[in-house]
Amino acid sequence: MKNIKSWVTWSIANAFFLYEVVLRVSPSTMTDDLMLHYGITTSVLGITISFFYYSYVVLQIPCGLILDKLGPRNLIGISVILSVFGSILFALTDSILVAQCGRFLVGAGASCAFISSLQIASTVFPARYFPIFAGITNMMGTFGALCSGFPVAKFVNVVGWQKTMLALALAGIILAVLTFAFVPKTIRIPENMGMQKSFTSILKKVTKNKQIILSGLVGGFMYLPVSVFSELWAIPFFMTKHNVNNEVASLAASSLFIGFAIGSIPIALIAKKVRSYTKTMRFSMVCTAALFFALIYSQSMCFSFVIVFLIGIFTAAQVIIFTCARNNASPRNSGTAIALANGLVMLAGSIFQPVFGILLDFFWAGKTSESGIRLYDISCYQQAIITLPICLVAAYVLSIFIKETINIEGSAH
């Protein structure tokens, strides 16, 4: 019976992680609808959607402490309700300020999803199986991103974006009910995960560790193809470039997530073969940058599918940075090191999502639709996308200063 409860608890936590990824990515399927509804430009849209990250990033490091204080039932249940409330605000308001508050609340609720799943797995299952459960959790996040692509786009086209968001809120209410019904109120948290007594001292040590900061910055730049391109701007890019609807464009955007999931294991094997984190990451950076230039000038939708899929495969090397952060910290500080690195990764997305929108407005040629929405030709997107390979070059330079470690292990986030 105890084993069944453990599986149910971990499964609900995983479902929560999948759910938060769907909420994070789904606005990419409704960009035109959002700009029309709120009467905003791409710059404001990018800022609005990135409000998710502002609360998410701030709450990353305290997640372990919050879990220890509230327990899994209360933490997950309250977090889901917070995300549901934020989604309802986002769907029902005509005010862009209220919409931004809604996204902020969604991000606050989602901030504990990933670490909750990992901490539950580390406490209710034998330690030797932890890498497997962490990998499954990472796959659930990818599956959530896929669900937020074509399925959500199809739903948006049938019932509209507002009813779609309300339907997602309803799914969250069901998840909250399941959480309060089946997840235990308390769970034993090991000392090295809970960070109770020495949380402040651990935080100081980790934030002063340049290797962890470098790992997080490199990971943030490497993750931009996902956090900026695929999660928000890929769909309008493909709609503009290849004159397709949001359903087809969402399939192209989702192919990056598929490549990311498939590439994780081969990338780890390559890293073990060459006995180097940094060489593997640099190789992936060069390939990803080259593929973005190919994507900019591709005239074939089918070829674009292949390019984005390959971008996903090479971007999968980004998960290596969490191993770099962990191995460059003491064992007692490893959990906080990973949380800090993940916070920096998400911070990069929160910065560059609106930057991309600002660039689109900067290169805008002055065209508008009959409804007053700004129309961005493909040259606007092409010039904005160039920022991604530039950031990968910056990541390449920063990676030179990351210390190489001998023991190569898998990592997930």
Image (cartoon, grey):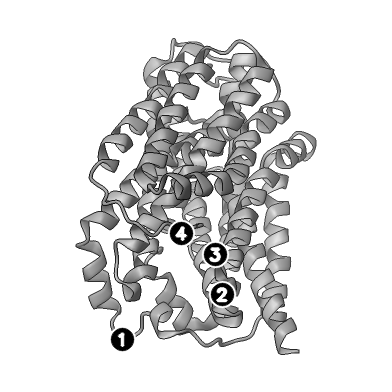
**Mark 1: which amino acid?**
Lys
- CA separation in Å, label 4 and label 2: 13 Å
Label 1 sits on a secondary structure element that is loop
| Label 1 Cα crowd, 10 Å radius (few <14 / some 14-19 / many 20+) | few
Residue 47 pos. (x, y %): 42, 39
Residue 235 pos. (x, y %): 60, 29
The residue tagged 3 is 113
The residue tagged 2 is 128
Residue 191 pos. (x, y %): 40, 85
User: Which quadrant of the structure image shows residue 323?
Assistant: bottom left
The residue tagged 4 is 409
Give left or right: position of 400 versus 191: left
The residue tagged 1 is 197
- Between 343 and 174, the residue placed more toward the observer is 343
Q: Nearer the viewer, mark 2 or mark 1?
A: 2
| Label 2 Cα crowd, 10 Å radius (few <14 / some 14-19 / many 20+) | few
- CA separation in Å, label 4 and label 3: 23 Å
Q: Badges 2 and 1: C-beta atoms under 8 Å apart?
A: no
Q: Nearer the viewer, mark 4 or mark 3?
A: 4
Is residue 187 among the parts visible in the rendering?
yes
Label 4 sits on a secondary structure element that is loop
- CA separation in Å, label 3 and label 1: 23 Å
Q: Earlier in the sequence, mark 4 or mark 3?
A: 3
**Mark 4: which amino acid?**
Glu
Q: Earlier in the sequence, mark 4 or mark 2?
A: 2
Name the residue: 51% across, 17% down.
294
**Mark 3: which amino acid?**
Ala
Residue 297 pos. (x, y %): 52, 12
**Mark 2: which amino acid?**
Arg
Name the residue: 65% across, 34% down.
255
